[in-house]
Image: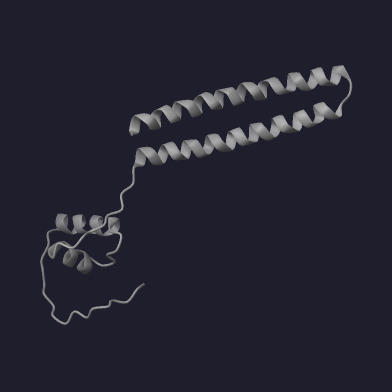
């Protein structure tokens, strides 16, 4: 925790209602620079610039979904690469047909995930 650069020798007492204290605590949590309620009140009282951190919860859930989709697409891609590797290693046509049949469900699941991804991207366009 950083040390204060200014010493405050004069003490004043202020009384707050419980709802006002809750509002101050919420502001303090969102404040970027204030570490105590006293600092917050001084900044507000003397009209200093107060920087608040906000977060968009709808965007946060979308980002989580995008991360999950990225992981699933990555796993599908790894499966397709492994099957392709075995496909090229085997010389016979029967084995190649087998590997092609193995690959089709992975392509279909990748298409579903890509469609979900397009839906999320369209949702992000609406948020802006």
**Color theme of the render:** one colour
The quadrant of the picture occupied by the N terminus is: bottom left
Q: Would you place residue 78 above or below residue 55 in this image?
A: above
Q: Quadrant of residue 94?
A: top right
Task: Identify the residue at horizontal 58%, vertical 38% (top origin).
Answer: 71
Please give left or right for residue 106 compared with residue 50 in the image.
Answer: right
The residue most toward the right is: 92
Left or right of 41 on screen, residue 113: right
**Residue at (27% x, 78% y) in the render:** 5
Residue 116 image offset from top left, x and y in percent: 50, 26
Image coords of residue 50 (percent x, y): 22, 59
Residue that appears at 56% across and 23% down? 112
Residue 21: x and y, percent?
Answer: 18, 59
Q: Quadrant of residue 44?
A: bottom left
What's the residue at 50%, 29% (across, down)? 117
Q: In the shown orientation, is residue 109 left or right of residue 27?
A: right
The foreground one among 18 and 120 is 120
Q: Position of residue 14 (x, y in %)?
A: 10, 68
Left or right: 110 as drawn, with respect to 52: right
Q: Residue 97 appears in which quarter of the rendering? A: top right
Q: Quadrant of the C terminus?
A: top left
**Vertical side of 31 occupied by 81: above or below:** above
């Amino acid at each position: 925790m950083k040390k204060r650069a200014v010493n405050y020798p004069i003490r004043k007492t202020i009384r707050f209602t419980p709802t006002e204290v809750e509002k101050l605590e919420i502001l303090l949590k969102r404040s970027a620079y204030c570490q105590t309620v006293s600092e917050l009140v001084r900044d507000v009282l003397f009209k200093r610039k107060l920087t608040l951190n906000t977060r968009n919860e709808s965007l946060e859930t979308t980002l989580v979904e995008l991360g999950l989709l990225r992981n699933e697409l990555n796993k599908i891609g790894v499966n397709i690469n492994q099957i392709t590797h075995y496909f090229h290693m085997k010389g016979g046509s029967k084995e190649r047909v087998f590997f092609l049949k193995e690959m089709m469900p992975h392509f279909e699941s990748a298409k579903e995930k890509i469609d979900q991804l397009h839906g999320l991207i369209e949702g992000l366009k609406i948020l802006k």
